Image (cartoon, rainbow, N blue to C red):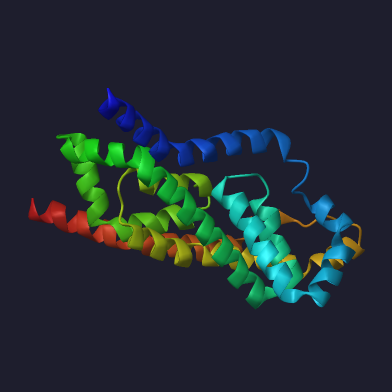
Amino acid sequence: MDDVSHSNRNSFMRHAPLAAILTAAVVGYFTLGDYFTFETLQENREALMAFRDANYAGLVVAFVAVYFVIVAFSLPGAAVASVTGGFLFGLLAGTVFNVTAASLGAFAIFWAARLGLGRALAARMEASEGTIKRLKTGLHEHEISVLFLLRLVPAVPFFVANLVPALVGVRFFNYAFTTVLGIIPGAIVFTWIGVGLGEVFDRGESPDLSLLWEPEIIGPILGLCALAALPILIKTIRGRKEI
């Protein structure tokens, strides 16, 4: 009886972090959408700038912490946070802080999923035969390329790109490496928009995130997607030739 109780307690502890993230994501979606907005940023613009000038390091820590929580718990407002990084800190520093916070939040989701549901699911996939085993083998053969594609393809939600790799048992080093490098292009674009946000506010307008889909922006990102997919394509073609 004690062994069963201990096992249940361990199982609960393993699944608790992911359950907490999913719960926070659902609650945050319905309750926080009105807080993490550009209107909120505009209303607090002067206070934030004054605090930055008086305590730059303190604002950096606060910004990274808030952005980390947004990503780690999949709360609404990641785009606003990224633009805010450029608005407060400029293109270079803002990009560094955005990538740091987003990466740390992504790592938190990965380990929450890996230590809970991911461990059991990866073990089942390892023991499976047929299609599932072939899919898992194929993923590990092209792990870096697939992870880069998850980060670079604009249609893949950030939460999905954080969660799925943990559930299918990818190596954490590969996940971390591709996460940090893979989010840099998007982070630069969002930060760049934030750099000019003050002028947008002065005109009484809201930032236009449709810029992300302009050919000169989306083109290079899609080019990186094609580059990431190239090793998979080459290996597939070679495999067919050998057959």
Q: Position of residue 135 (x, y in %)?
A: 24, 42
Q: Position of residue 5 (x, y in %)?
A: 33, 27
Image: 24 above or below 172: above
Residue 157 seen anywhere in this rendered image of the structure:
no
Number of disc labels: 0
Q: Residue farthest to the left?
A: 243
> Residue 61: which quarter of the image?
bottom right
Image: 217 above or below 31: below
Whether residue 62 sits left or right of residue 234 in the image: it is right
Image: 17 above or below 175: above
Residue at x 66%, y 45% (from the top left corner):
76
> Residue 32: which quarter of the image?
top right
> Residue 131: which quarter of the image?
top left
Whether residue 150 sits left or right of residue 57 in the image: it is left
Residue at x 70%, y 61% (from the top left corner):
83
Residue at x 53%, y 55% (from the top left corner):
105
Whether residue 141 sits left or right of residue 80 in the image: it is left
Q: Residue farthest to the front?
A: 2
Q: Nearer the viewer, residue 130 or 176?
A: 176
Residue at x 41%, y 43% (from the top left corner):
113
Q: Nearer the viewer, residue 112 or 177?
A: 112
State the quadrant of the N terminus.
top left
Residue 55 seen anywhere in this rendered image of the structure:
yes
